Image (cartoon, rainbow, N blue to C red):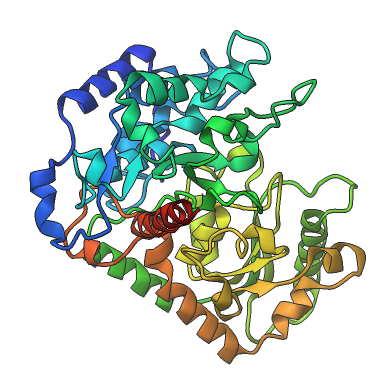
Amino acid sequence: MAPPRSPPFSTTTAIILLLFLTIFPFPTLQQQSDLDSDCTNRWIHIRHLPPRFNLDILTNCSTTHHPFSDDFCPFISNHGLGTKTHNRSHSWFRTDPSLLELFFHRRMLEYPCLTSDPSTADAIYLPYYASLDSLHYLFGPDYNSSSQHGLHLYKFLRYQDSPEIWLNHQGHDHFLVLAGSAWDVSQPLDNDPPLWGTSFLELPEFFNITALTLESRAYPWQEQSIPYLTSFHPPNLALLDSWIKRVRRSRRSTLMLFAGGGGISSTPTVRRSIRLECDNNSKIENTTQKSNRYSRLCEFVDCSSGICEHDPIKFMKPMLHASFCLQPPGDTPTRRSTFDSILAGCIPVFFEELSAKKQYGWHLPEDQYKEFSVLIPKEDVVFKGVSVLEILKGIPRSVTGRMRDKLIEMIPRIMYRKHGSSLGLRTKKDAFDIAIEGTLQRIKARLDDVADQ
């Protein structure tokens, strides 16, 4: 049985943690230089930002500072990975996806092609915890201050700290990470009255930067979705291989699984349709002959009120025993569960293309989706009575086998390995590596376009 969650950090504890991070920094450039000798077109400069733009934000992690937001203090440890799920765990953590900015910062500090000279860099990373900082504007003492989010950063970059770095390319070479949906930081500046979210990505001052988000909008060129943080962060190749072997040999005794919440109101939604179909088939199972192929047709893991978010055991074990994992949209199209299901070898079933296909092109190429996932339009399920269960039952065993093999092949691409991982594991590109590779290519293309204008 997993130990109880540790109590939230006090502000004092958080400050001590930050002092530790500051006094004992991460691997130096000299320590990392031997990992990759060819840094052509791959040099990155990390802008030095005052702690108020990143580490100081973590001291305001409790609901004392943001009474209407979640308390993320317990998950700051291990540079944003959170505590281990149990004492003997090496790869599984109680990770909160909202701390992607902290974890990405940590991984950037061990990137092998860092340069201290911004003029020679191919890209410039801004270690600004934008999504976490947005809480100050959404729940802070100044009412309707969301339009100010980011202006303090722009003033620092443009006027206070070596302005020539920004002016060299007007920000086209800069990138940052947003641990949330772009919709949460893209409220139009002229909204009156203001709606939910800040206006960070709507500020003209930041139109040129590249923003890596957990969920992007369809139209801005500067936004690109990258995978959610899951709870799996292996430190070496042996532990990754061990997990993949477990996924391969896992017996898939459940046809389809939905881990999530919602769908309990009378309003027609795809989640409601899924829950009704799952409930109905669970009752049929108890009174009729079971399928020759599956001992259970549908399993529902209730993750209402966020009870599964930091306890991967609740959903990973059922996913390991399911053939298909349903990924209906919720408040927004994307779900962390998509990446949990890939880790478990559970074939994701999407109900709209915005849930993944139009989001994660760097990590999950659009032209390969039919090889590892199923798409059932939500309109067909909600308004035409299409049965998800019948569609999935009709997929031949040989096809599901090939899809699972493809899914397992992609596990390294969507996971974030642990910081300080072994050299052997670093030979496999993980979600961070692919995000950096895509960012460098996008910035180069953008700079070339600007030069041609």
- 192 left or right of 152 in image: right
Does residue 32 sit above or below 105 in this rendering? below
Q: Nearer the viewer, residue 9 or 411?
A: 411
Does residue 372 sit above or below 445 in this rendering? below
**x 44%, y 20%: residue:** 155
Please, which residue is most extreme toward the front here? 453
Residue 409 placement (x, y as % from top left): 41, 75
Q: Is residue 245 above or below residue 25?
A: below
Tally of numbered tags: 0
Foreground residue among 116 and 402? 116
Does any portion of residue 105 appear in the rendered image?
yes
Q: Residue 309 in the image: x percent, y percent?
A: 53, 43
**Direction from residue 435 to residue 400 in the image, left or right:** right
Q: Nearer the viewer, residue 325 or 126?
A: 126
> Residue 225 in the image: x percent, y percent?
53, 53
Residue found at the very far top of the displayed protein: 141
Q: Position of residue 404 (x, y in %)?
A: 50, 78
Residue 284 in the figure: left or right of residue 411: right
Give the residue drawn at x 52%, y 46%. Answer: 213
